[in-house]
């Protein structure tokens, strides 16, 4: 919330200024945050096997999927 306030974001309709602030926020890649969610054992095993076969980390795979599937 503090980052959004610093960028001048507040509830309401998006304006050009807010769009520019959102773009600058999306360009900030240096700050990492931890995301925690649950999978059932089978899903987790499938993900681990896929990661091992592709020689990538689970984090890298999930980041790639987010970049690919969620529009900016």
Image: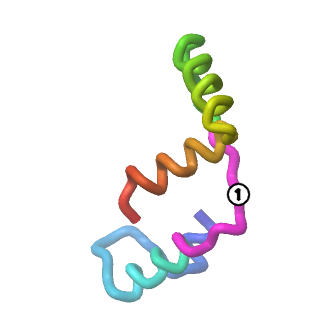
For label 1, the crowd category at 10 Å Cα-Cα, with few meaning under 14, some 14 to 19 and many 20 or more, is few
Magenta residues, dominant SS class = loop
**Mark 1: which secondary structure?**
loop
Find residue 4 and report its image quarter. Answer: bottom right
- The x, y position of residue 62, in whole percent, is 56, 43
Please give the name of the residue rendered at 32% of the width and 83% of the height, measured from the top-left corner. Answer: 15
Which residue does the numbered mark 1 point to in the structure image? 32
User: What colour scheme has been applied to the protein in the rendered image?
Assistant: rainbow
Please give the name of the residue rendered at 59% of the width and 20% of the height, measured from the top-left corner. Answer: 44
> For the view shown, which residue lies furthest in the top direction?
41
Find residue 20 and report its image quarter. Answer: bottom left
Q: Where does the N terminus fall, quadrant-wise?
A: bottom right
Q: How many marks?
A: 1
Question: Relative to 51, is 29 above or below?
Answer: below
- The x, y position of residue 36, in whole percent, is 64, 35
> For the view shown, which residue lies furthest in the bottom direction?
17
Question: Relative to 44, is 58 above or below?
Answer: below
Find residue 68 and report its image quarter. Answer: bottom left
- The residue closer to the viewer here, 55 or 68, is 55
Q: Report the span colored magenta.
A: 26-35
Please give the name of the residue rendered at 47% of the width and 56% of the height, measured from the top-left corner. Answer: 67
Question: Relative to 30, is 41 above or below?
Answer: above
- The residue closer to the viewer here, 55 or 48, is 55
Q: Where does the C terminus fall, quadrant-wise?
A: bottom left
- The x, y position of residue 43, in whole percent, is 53, 18
Please say whether residue 30 is one of the residues in the magenta stretch: yes
Please say whether residue 72 is one of the residues in the magenta stretch: no
């Amino acid at each position: 919330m503090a980052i959004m306030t610093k960028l001048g974001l507040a509830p309401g309709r998006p304006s050009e200024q807010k769009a520019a602030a959102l773009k600058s926020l999306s360009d900030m890649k240096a700050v990492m945050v931890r995301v925690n969610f649950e999978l059932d054992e089978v899903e987790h095993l499938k993900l681990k096997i896929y990661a091992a076969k592709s020689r990538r980390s689970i984090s890298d795979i999930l980041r790639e999927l987010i970049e690919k599937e969620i529009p900016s």
